[in-house]
Image (cartoon, grey):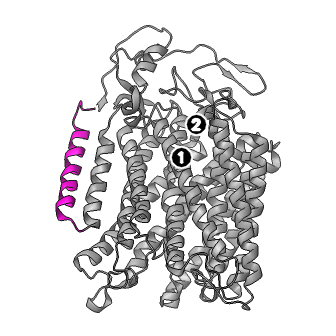
Amino acid sequence: MSDATAPPPSGRSAPDIALLDQVWGSKPGFIGWVGQCNHKAVGRRFIFTSFFFLMLGGSLAMLMRLQLIGPDNDVVGPEAFNQLFTMHGTIMMFLFVVPMLEGFTIYVAPLQLGSRDMPMPRLNAFGYWGFLLGGIFLLSSFVVGAVPDSGWFAYVPLTRSSYSPGANLDFWLLGVTMLEISGIAASIEVIALVLRFRASGMSVSRMPIFVWTSLIVSVMIMFAFPPLVAGTILLELDRKIGTVFYDATFGGDPLLWQHLFWWFGHPEVYIQLIPALGMAASIVTVSARRRMAGRTAVIVSLVAIAILSFGLWVHHMYATGIPILATSLFTAASFMIAIPTGVIIMAFIGTMWWGRIVWRSSMLYVAGFVFVFVAGGITGVMVAMVPFDWQAHDTYFVVAHFHYVLVGGSLFPILGGLHHWMPKLTGRIMSESLGKVAFALNFVGFNVAFLPQHWLGLFGMPRRIWTYEAGLGWDGLNLISTAGSFVMGIGMLLFAINMIRANWPGGTQAPDDPWGGDTLEWATESPAPDYNFVGTMQIASPEPLWDTESVLSREHTYPDGRVRTDPPHERPEWQHRLDHPEARLREAIATSGLDAEPDHIVTLPGHSLWPLWCAVAIAVSLVGVLIDSFALGSVGLVAIIATTATWLWPGVE
């Protein structure tokens, strides 16, 4: 709800902190906690829930490696192995990386922009509840003994009801649909935030690189996720009511699924990479104590990667009989995307080269990311070539390649980001000594686990096999790979212990700006108050804490003890209204799209349980579809309409 009327004139008294705490704070008790819609509460939930899914998905991977440690092993059977690799891939792709990055965006981006909250807090909360219930829906398949077993890509015709008659794949299709809806909701929220909720003076050219990556990826999601939602719905219709969208016998096309899936799937790789690049840029800048080298080139390259990523999906389909002329075009696009990626990596290296690096754990993870991701990018160029891809397709070479890209390109920056932003998330600092040990184990363990898999692929080992015979030349390499995976598992366990230990009672309290940051999240308290900022800020550069032209709203203490107190400045009339919420409304200022000039005051909703009930209603309807209950599905559909209408009704909490 927007109030564009001019605020009444008033004095220049100090912000009413007690009243701000009361207006922006959460309601007491469990119901108050559940009904929180503030971006920091929602962001923390995304981050820590997805971290749990990371540990779960990693545990499944270690079970697979234990099965493959030697020939003719029988730790798990073939059916269980199919379920393990399906759920490992699904958890990592749909329940860990993207939700984790969404969580960082939801938490950090409003702080970097100088905003008090996301523009649609209830939609924000709905995104989390949809993610959580979608994850619970998928994992409940373990409880009922119908675990998805068709791979995280669910290729037809093997996933039609004639070949997969149980509910296994229905769990996957319906759960993934709900997760994608959650992602779309989050992307709408982020686009509105970045375009209209920025500190005064923060033009688009002055936005932090992490915010740029958040905006770019949110736009990508709006184009990449809906086709997958459509594809999963069409496949579920084929399975449930006998439509023939993917049945070649009746005029359908099995390759339609691959086109829809990989139109989502290849941009998804960059949807995971681009925010991780933004996180790495934030860490590199602060750790090197230098402004990002080639900042404009980095931003242009990020946009180029986003555009080119939608021209690569057939990269995964060379073995399907696509005409050679068509595949050559996608080969060229696959080569082209290496250029902007290389520009960004060189900018990172240049920033480190000319800076004075402080080698904290976060920076070590970024250095590991550069090494691992570049290696994965080189093998990516190799599999972009059609003749080589025909030889390596569906072998362990491809498994090694995409783990180098995804672990290097996403997991390492995420772990570095948790070290870097933990002071803002919880007000605590993770142990540096334990963090460096965990990094060493993760880096060494990862390379020991996945580097041999390149040779396994070249030696002919197919992916997704549950066992193999002795004497094929795969025994020793599989043993080394499994040993490396357990070393990395120990590293991840140490990382989790470090994170829990830091946030346990007695953990190290973080100052407001422990690293000497350059962006606005370090200009407020650790953790930030419910309202984020008070007073007037005027932004004059992308690094407002490092320049003297920008005006901060409070006294700032740097890690070396220097205290920055900007001279008194004129507070506009609207700022008094925001800092003295006498109407007891959560209000924020909306700004113009390009130059971030103050435009009008917006009233934001607060506590609400309706986003949760709406997500529950969607889950109920999906359960109805799963068990072929028309009545339950209809109840869920009616509940979706009712909860959405109530949620949007003016004045309803």
Q: Which residue is at the front of the view, 167 or 345?
A: 167
Question: Callout 2: 10 Å neighbours few (<14), some, many (20+)?
Answer: many
Question: Which residue is denoted by mark 1 in the rendering?
Answer: 47
> Does residue 251 lie above or below 503 as drawn?
below
The residue located at (68%, 32%) in the rendering is 507
Location of residue 233 by image quarter: bottom left
Q: Which residues are magenta?
A: 628-653
Per the rendering, the mark at residue 425 is: 2
Q: Is residue 608 above or below residue 10?
A: below
Q: Looking at numbered disc 2 in the image, what kind of residue is underneath it?
A: Leu
- Coordinates of residue 470 in the picture (x, y in percent): 71, 89
The tally of labels here is 2
x and y, in percent, of residue 634 in the image = 18, 58
Whichever of callouts 2 and 1 sits on the residue coming sooner in the sequence is: 1
Residue at 65% x, 81% y is 73
Q: Is residue 144 left or right of residue 342?
A: left
Residue 634 forms part of the magenta stretch = yes
Give percent across and percent down for residue 169. Answer: 38, 73
Q: Secondary structure at mark 2?
A: helix
Using the numbered discs, state the Cα–Cα distance from disc 2 to disc 1 in whole angstroms.
Answer: 10 Å
> Which quarter of the figure is the C terminus placed in?
top left
Structural crowding at the residue carrying mark 1, measured as other residues with C-alpha within 10 Å and reported as few (<14), some (14–19) or many (≥20): many
Relative depth, front residue between 635 and 198: 635
In the image, 382 versus 143, the foreground residue is 143
- Asked whether disc 2 touches disc 1, contact meaning CB atoms under 8 Å apart, the reply is yes
| Res 613 seen here | yes
Q: Quadrant of residue 124?
A: top left
Magenta stretch: residue 473 in it? no
Q: Is residue 229 left or right of residue 454?
A: left
